[in-house]
Image (tube, rainbow, N blue to C red):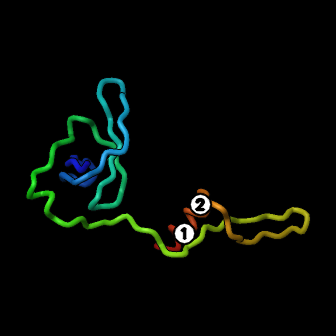
């Protein structure tokens, strides 16, 4: 379900999908995915609103997507042969994610 949240960083109201809710010391905090900015933020529950129908008619600026046939890689170190090389991995680890983000930049 899409809702509208206020982003302190962007200083505006944004459409978002709520991912999780957690209780902090004196309020509830919500993790949201901003559908127009493709980023995750945390907002207080008091900064969440029900969207107007006209606001929902605007097309999303960001879309979740996959890169076709892009495979994760990781660094494999062979201590016996004293070599290191980038090899295919079964899943994306943090180093592979950082490497891919640097390539995109």
Q: Secondary structure at mark 1?
A: helix
Q: Residue at x 60, y 64 (%)?
A: 96
Q: Are marks 2 and 1 in contact (CB under 8 Å)?
A: yes
Read off the residue under disc 1: 100
Read off the residue under disc 2: 92
Q: Position of residue 62 (x, y in %)?
A: 30, 66
- Residue 31, picture quadrant: top left
Q: Considering only order in the chain, which callout, 1 or 2, is on the residue closer to the N terminus?
A: 2
Q: Secondary structure at mark 2?
A: loop
Could you classify mark 1 by the number of other residues whose Cα lies within 10 Å: few (under 14), some (14-19), or many (20 or more)? some
Q: Nearer the viewer, residue 69 or 87?
A: 69
Q: Name the side, left or right, on which 83 lies relative to 74.
A: right
Q: Residue at x 36, y 45 (%)?
A: 19
Q: Marks 2 and 1, Cα distance to the nearest angstrom?
A: 10 Å
Q: Position of residue 15 (x, y in %)?
A: 22, 54
Q: Residue at x 71, y 65 (%)?
A: 75
């Amino acid at each position: 379900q899409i809702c509208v949240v206020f982003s302190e960083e962007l200083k505006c109201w944004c459409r978002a999908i709520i991912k999780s809710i957690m209780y902090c010391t004196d309020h509830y905090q919500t993790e949201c995915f901003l559908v127009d900015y493709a980023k995750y933020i945390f907002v207080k529950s008091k900064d969440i609103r029900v969207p107007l129908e006209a606001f929902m008619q605007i097309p999303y600026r960001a879309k979740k997507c996959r890169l076709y046939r892009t495979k994760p890689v990781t660094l494999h170190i062979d201590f016996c042969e004293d070599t290191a090389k980038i090899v295919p991995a079964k899943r994306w680890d943090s180093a592979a994610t950082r490497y891919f983000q640097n390539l995109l930049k």
